[in-house]
Structure formats: structure tokens, C-alpha cells
Image (tube, rainbow, N blue to C red):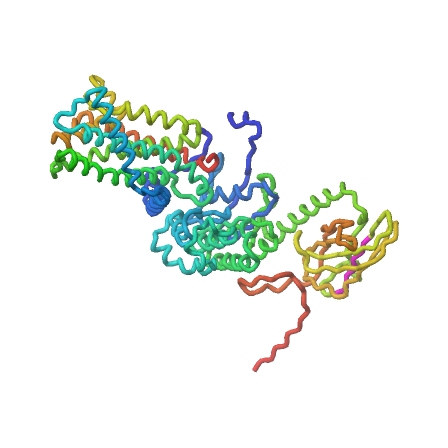
Amino acid sequence: MSARYHRPVAPSTWLKELWGSRDLVTALTIRELQARYKHAVLGCLWALLVPLTLMLVFTTVFRHVAHVETGDAPYAVFAYIGLLVWTFFSTSVSLASQSLLNNAQLFNRVYFPREVFPLGAVAVAAVDNGVALVALGLLFLLTGTSPHVSLAHAPALVVLLGVVYAWTIAVSLIVATAVVYLRDLRHLLPIVLQVGIIATPVAYGFDAIGGQRRWYSLANPLGPVIDGFRRVLLYDRAPQWGLVGLGALSAGLGLVVAYAVFKRLETGLADIA
Amino acid sequence: MRRQNLPRWRWALQDVSLRAEPGDSIGLVGPNGSGKTTLLRLLTRVMYPYAGRVEVGGRVGALIEIRAGLHPELSGAQNVYFFGALLGLRRREVARRFDEIVSFAELEHALDRPVKYYSSGMQMRLGFAAASFLDPAVLLVDEVLAVGDASFQQRCLARMRELLGAGKTLIFVSHDLAAVEMTCRRALWLEEGRVRADGDVRDVLNAYRESVDQHSAARRLGSAEEVSLLSVSVLGERAGTVVAGAAAVVDLVLANTQPHWCLVCVGVSEDPSSPIFVLRRDLHLQAGTTRMRCTIENLPLPGGRYWLWAGVFDRAGRPLSAWHAACAFDVAGPALDVPPPAVVLRAPVYVGSVWEIEAG
């Protein structure tokens, strides 16, 4: 791979190219959303069904099998917040993993920055997530709890969302290219994501991780972020900034490295895909 | 290291150096698998060289595959915008050229239909129109033009010359050598990834035609046919030189094993494709060798190099000796007058003319 010629361009050129392709990302996202929901009877309700079903399963299982301490917040809402974050992440990654291979026919045309495909996948997952967010409002109503939404929380929510996006985009970029070069990963990815939903504090609280939470936050920034969302929305407390900071560090570094790796491997995509 | 261990690894292109200025037109010719499309893909930045450098300034419009730039699920109209987005154009920039693109492609009636239901000719028309009207600085066109009908091909060639006139750069791959010759000033002949010749389009194409002919002559040697063509030549009446507008003699020697009623055809072409004219003669061939002379009274060809084709057929049209380019010959005389820009000559015919000009 080291013999592969790569363009001697600066990251500023990448970003300029990417900015020039913003219409393309929009077009791809709309196109993908149409393809996803046009011929489905339930349409975009499917975006709701995945997290809702899992939430019902978790609620049932954890009510009867194991007890999760959720304070004065209902477990359903508690789990659903974790599921929203996790579903966004896993939908992004699995869509991104197919995005380059599915669009291989587009590669033989014109040059445009290839990251538009994984980024389009993240955008599709974001729209899905927006739909699923509606259900969160309904859940609050149904369970008779009220979310602690105030302007004072807005900066915390923005930071938490920023970490989620940075981490999701980083992993999506890496997975998208890795799958092209090593097709086996297509079979491995669903397993990893299934393990991930257990290994991430989605169904249980972040405290259950125990004493290794610093290392955990570095390895999986989604952990402290989910915890942060719950603290803010359910308990009216601030996120654990120390741990969120470690997660943000990991996500930020991950994004930079993933983008650089992607741009390096991008040059060979047309030969292989 | 790793690459040398791969058993079937080979360079698709090697030692290719090419520099084109705005307004240059380069035709790429060569047999299948010689690296023409790979070179175009490198220029579009779709592929990258393992060694060497490619620099392209400005936007590249490319038509490399029939579906190039088209998304099968989107409608024709959406595809125009999608193609623009692929090139990094803003929506309103595409909107400005939208009507031109649609009317050039003649697809007004099919705009709302998904492109997957288009015929390959329609897809090619849309692709070419979008690639050539969305302000490319460099236009790359691969063999796909052959999919279009004759009139659309002519309009594509005209459009390519129009872009050249506007100072754009054109790289054109085609097996239709006449189209290359009419459109490009310079030609690059690739073979097995290397440059065989690079220079003025006429010189390169003549060398290429000669090699194609030698190749097909070599292939013919092995074939056993009922009538064999022992020798073919074209000579002028005086001193052997064939002169434009004067008489020329085609000399054929045939050998056959048994008597045949047959049809002997000869034709003349400018390149290894369709002939400009064909002459034929029915006759009863005796067993043994037969010498035939056909005198063309006023050879209607301008100066240049041509091919003589010959073939012998039975009454049912079955070939006794297959139709093939048998020899090349040169015609001395005035070259053809250059047509006005964007006018395409169907075939080079020499017509003697006298102009009288009276002032007042």
C-alpha cells in the first residue's frame, strides 16, 4: 500500500473540495431516503420501529430478569435515550459500510471527494434519528415524566451531540473504506454491532461500568455521552465533564485520523470497488 | 515487492508523457486493452497512478462509460442536476444550462422517466449533453459515442469542435479513425500501455492504419479459401503513380481450384472501415489463375493514402474470398479543401472545379 501514489494536497484542499460537494451530499441523502421509504408501506415509521422495539424488549427483560437502578425516571425513557444514540451510531456505521460498494458504479465517472458517501450515510441516519426523536416526546407524555429542557442545558446538549457526531463520522469513514479493501468485514460488522449494543450502557446505567470508566470513555465515547444525555434530560444534572472530555478527545482525534486515512486510501477505491 | 509476486500483474500504462494546452485536441487510438480508457480515468482522477504524476487544471467533463454520471433510479431531469453535483456545480449553475442540455440530448419527452428505463442511446445522449454543457475545461470522450445514432454522433462531433473553438481541451478515444481525424489535431497511438506514436493526427493515424492492415493481412494468411487472391495492386496510367482525377488501374490476380460463377468486388476506403465506393463485376471464373484489370477512369480521390479492398462472392453472397483491405496505395494530387468549422465531410471526394470571379 505504501507504493500507492497519493495526491500531495493539504487538508485545507480536502475541506474545500468537501464544501464544494455539499449539494452532492444533499442529493445523495435525499436519494437514499427515498429509496429507503418510498416503496415501504410504513414509510419513515420504520425509523421509529427499531429503537421502539428494542426499548420494549429491554423494558420487559430488565423488569423481570435484572433490575436497573434508574432513580425517579421511568426505565422506558431511560433506555430509549440510550437507544436513540446507539441507533444513530449503528445505522450510520452499517449504512456507511455499504455506501462505497453500493455506489461503486459512480466511481468510474468523475472525480469528487469520496467521503460524500459515508457522510451521506450519516446524514440519512440523522434524519431517521430525528423521526425517532418524536417518539421520545411521546414517551415522556405517556410515562407522565417531564424532560428537563431549559436554555441552561443547551450548551451541554450541543457538546454531547458534537461528540456523538464526531465519533460516528470517524467510525463510519474507517468502516466504509475498510469494507472495500477487506470484504470479510461485511460479515463481521453485524456481530460487532450486536456486541456493541451490550457493551455500551444502552440498557443499563453508565455507573455499572465500575472503576474503569476513564479507559472506557476513551475507548467508547458513546458511554459518557449517553450518560450525559440522561443526566441532563432526566435528572437535571450536568454531564460528567471529565469523562465526556476524554470521550471528546477520543472522538476528535479519531475523526482527524479517520479522515486522513480515508483520504489516503480513497485513491485506490476505483481500482478495487 | 508485493506486486511482483502477483502472477498476472502488469503495467496498464508505462512511460506515457503527455502535455496538452487549452485548445488542444488529442485523439487516442490503439487496439482494445492498450490503456486508452485507463489513461482517461487517470485524467478524471477516478484512478491514480502507482508511479508518475497527473495534473489537470480546471473542471473535467468526462463520458467514459455509457452510464457515466447517471444514477439509474433518478429521472432524466434529476440526473442532470445530480451530474452537476458530481462535478461540484451549484444547483443554479446547472439550472442555467438545463434547457440547453435537454434540447441537445433531445430528451424533452423522457425527462420524468427514471434513467434505468432509458435505452443505451438515450443514456449516452444525456451523459454527453451533461458532460459537454456543464462548462468543462477538459472534455474526455471515450468510445461510447458509437452507441448514438449517426445524426447524434455528428452533433457530438460538432459540439466537440465548438468547445475546442472556445479554448477547451479535448481528449477523444475512438475506433472511428475518420472521426478522430476530423476532430483532433494531434493523435497518440497507444499499444500495450506504451506510446507507439505521438504527433500530427494524419501521420499517426496513417502509421496506425498500416499496422492494423499488416495485422489483418497476417491473420488472413492462415485461412484456406475457395478463391485466393494472389496479388492486388493499384497503378496510375503514367509512370505508375496514381494521380487525383486521372485514370487508375486496379490489377487483381485470382486463383481457384474449380470453375465458379462469381462476383468480384473491389472498394476504396480512407481508413480500415467503410469504403468510399465499390466496383463489382459478375463473371465465370475458370479453374486456375485469372488476371483482372479494372480501369477507373477519373479517380475521384484527393491526395493521400487509401486502402484497396477486395473480395470474391458466389451468387448467394457467400464469400469465396473474404472482403478485406488488400493493399494500401497513395494518390498524388491536391489535398482536399478544408471545410468551414463544424462541417463534417462524409467522405473525401476530389471534384475538379474552376472558379470564375468577376469584380463589380
For image coordinates 50% across by 46% down, the residue present is: B65
Magenta part of the chain: B246-252
**In the image, residue A256 lies at what x, y percent?**
31, 32
Residue B133 appears left or right of A25: right
**In the image, residue A112 lies at what x, y percent?**
40, 43
Q: Is residue B171 magenta?
A: no
Number of marks drawn: 0
**In the image, residue A4 lies at what x, y percent?**
46, 32
Vertical comparison of B151 with A260: above or below = below
For image coordinates 53% across by 43% down, the residue present is: B37
Vertical comparison of A202 with B139: above or below = above
- Residue B13 falls in which quadrant of the image? top right
Residue B155 appears left or right of A262: right
For image coordinates 78% across by 57% down, the residue present is: B250
- Residue A167 falls in which quadrant of the image? top left
Residue A111 appears left or right of A226: right
Residue A270 appears left or right of B189: left
For image coordinates 23% across by 30% down, the residue present is: A82
- How would you classify the magenta stretch by its main secondary structure? strand
**In the image, residue A69 lies at what x, y percent?**
16, 22
Image quadrant holding the C terminus of chain B, namely bottom right
